[in-house]
Every structure is written in structure tokens, then in C-alpha cells.
Image (cartoon, grey):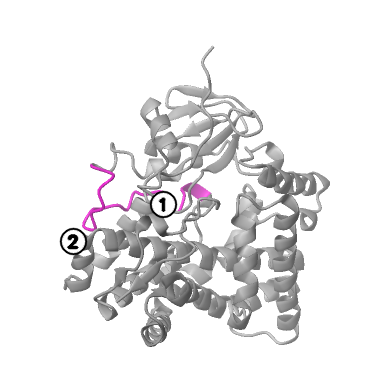
Amino acid sequence: MTTVPEYDIAREATCPLDPAPAMRARQEEGPLTRVRLWDGSTPWLVTGHAEHRAVLGHPKVSVQPANGIPRLSPSEAAAMESMAAAERAEKKSAGGTSFIMMDDPEHARLRRMVTSAFTVKRVEAMRPATQKIADDLIDAMLAGPKPGDLVEAFALPLPSLVISNLLGVPYDDHELFQANSRTIINRNSTPEQRGQAQQRLTGYLDGLIEEKLAKPGDDLLSGLVERVEAGEVSRQEAARMGVLMLFAGHETTANMITLGTLALLQHPDQLALLRDGDDPKLITTAVEELLRYLTITHGGLRRVALEDIEIAGQVIKAGEGIVVVNETANRDPSVFPDPDRLDLRRNARLHVTFGYGVHQCLGQPLARMELQVAYLALLRRVPTLALAADVEQIPFKHDGFVYGAYELPVTW
């Protein structure tokens, strides 16, 4: 009897920006294999690029907890069971179900309500304000202690300020939403800790909705309030949508700014291309390559087959779980030659960092713009930027569903 390998996403201490060795080993075995989770279940593991897109684009693959998607940890299992119970009871407010954990048509109905805020045109209109935020943060960092922590001084406040302004959330409350967001995505959080953090954030957004019902503003949350008043969405749904956008709008981009800066500092030839080059289009391709190379959403996207489907010559039967791994798909040599090399001139637009299909990241235009602004501002305003610690001393987020670093000591 063949032993099914354990699910292991631990990255090498000496290569913290590369996919986990165990995930690489599974990919070498084939694009579709089995893996054993903590609870003894053995879902399919998708590590190939073509197979990744085939699964996420398949109409008979579900993301809903009630349909039996894999649970990657005991804490997540408890949270998913709460969502599934709420779905079964048709009381969505009880489980805190976000629309990203819903299938169409309900997913599409809720997603359409906020899509217009993240169009390329709307996002580009935010670029000057984002540039000013970046410049102000760099001014403060340069005037502060040296060495400094790039996460605290720049990487975390920049997207937090941008998403706060977009949503209409007071930035003065950033410690509340940042701390609770960290608890939700930490693999080591207990079910109680994760549930309490979710409730705190939902309650906080519901309080803001209450304020905007009385005094609406020109922001995304006020737009959702109009939908509430029109009866198109419940107040609970609006609060959960606000939580999702607030969380996703700062945590992921902050980690990309941090790790992207680290990757560039480790590749001075590539850093010099951005810092000293005069090609205005290079930053666009550079951001796509950094998104591919780093893939901060590590650990896998969970799905379940609703019917028998065939992927890579294998039949995934109805009811079987699937874990789709972004970071190995982005290092697939059949799509990205020499995939472990960081090449800012590479055409990396086929990367799957934002997912694929109907559930791909809603805020990707905003993330791209923020990253373009952040990298250029940082490298050109601080041309002598350097690490102030050995890579082995950097505290990476091995315990999170979103990969990053808790601190990045830098000097100049």
C-alpha cells in the first residue's frame, strides 16, 4: 500500500522566499497527487499551472464549506463548520460567511456590488493620493531611528491608509483591524480566538454602517449602506463584505511590499534595473514577476468536486476535496522557464497569485497600483536601502495563511 505523504508547507530557513520543499517534491511526482491532512483526510493536491487553472475554472468545483472543502487546521475546521452550519440553517449571519466562500449565483450577486470600486480606471485615479501617502511615510522613516523596521514604517501603513480611505474607515482604528486580522490568518489561533477576532471586526464594521446610515459619505462603505437601504443586501452581509475588503486590502499588500523589497535587496542587479532604469513600463512587468516569484498566499486554496471531473487524466470523484497550490503553479517550468530565477523583465502575466476563475482576487488592480508606487518610491527615494539583519534573523510568517515577515530591519 502506497503511503500518502503529509501536507507540509514549511519553507526552508535558508530559502524562505521559495516554495516548501515538500510541495516541490509533490510537484515533481506529478501535477495532481494525494496528500494527508492533520485529520487523516487525503484530498487531491494540485501543483501544476494548467491543472490549477482547470480546477479553479471548473463549474462543478465548489468553495462552499457546507459542501465539504478540506480543512487545513483544527482552527480552520471549527470555523468552517460554523459557516457550514449557518448555510444549512440558512442563517448566514451566524457563521460569518463571506462571499468568497460562496458559489455562484450568490457569490456573483454580492461581488457585483463592490466591483466598480476596483476597476482600473477608478484605481488609477487613486494613484496620486497613494504616491503622497508613500512619500509621507518615507519622509517619516528617514527622519526616524536607523536602522528601522520597514513593516512598521512603510509596508503596513501604506495599504492600511489606502484601504481605509477607500472604505471610509478611520485610520486611527488601524491597530484594531490589523491585530484582529493577524489573529484570523494565524494557523495557530484557537477556534475561540479566531471566532472572537471575526466577531470584533464584524461588530466594528457594523458600527461604522450604523454611523453611515445616519451620515453617509463618499466611500465604498457608504455605497454598501445604500444597498442595505434599498433592500439589496442585509446589514450583516454588508458588514462581512466590509471585513473582507478591510482585511484583504491591507494584509496581503503589506506582505508583498515587505517580501518584494527583501527579494530585490537579495538581487541587487534586479533592484538596480528599477532604481536606476528609465523604462516607465518596467515597473509593471516587475510587479507581475514579484507576484509570481513570491506568491504570498501560500498553503493552498480549498475546493471540493460536486460531480466527477477529470483533471490531468485523473478522475476526481464527487465529494472529494482538492487543495490547489499557488506557489508551485507559479514555479511551473513548463510555463515559466528557469522559474526559480527572479527576472523583472520576464512576462509573468500568466501567474496565478490572484487565483483564477470567478473567485480571483477582486482587488488586484488596487494591489498592482500600490505595489508599483511602493517599490519605485522606496528604491528611488532611499537608493542606499539595505538589510540591517541576516535573512536567518528575519521573523517570517510561517504560521499564517498569508506569508510574509513580521519585521524587516533596514538601514540606509
Disc marking residue 269: 2
Vertical relation: 105 (above or below) 49: below
- Quadrant (top left, top right, bottom left, bottom right) of the C terminus: bottom left
Q: Are marks 1 and 2 in contact (CB under 8 Å)?
A: no
Q: Quadrant of residue 240?
A: bottom right
The disc labelled 1 sits on which kind of residue?
Thr
- How many numbered tags mark residues here? 2
Dot placed on the residue nearer the N-terminal end, 1 or 2: 2
Residue appearing at x 28%, y 63% in the figure: 265
Q: What is the magenta range?
A: 338-358
Distance Cα–Cα, label 1 vs label 2: 21 Å
Disc marking residue 295: 1
Residue 274 coordinates in the image, percent (x, y): 22, 68
Vertical relation: 33 (above or below) 112: above
The disc labelled 2 sits on which kind of residue?
Asp
Q: List the single residue furthest toward the top.
A: 1
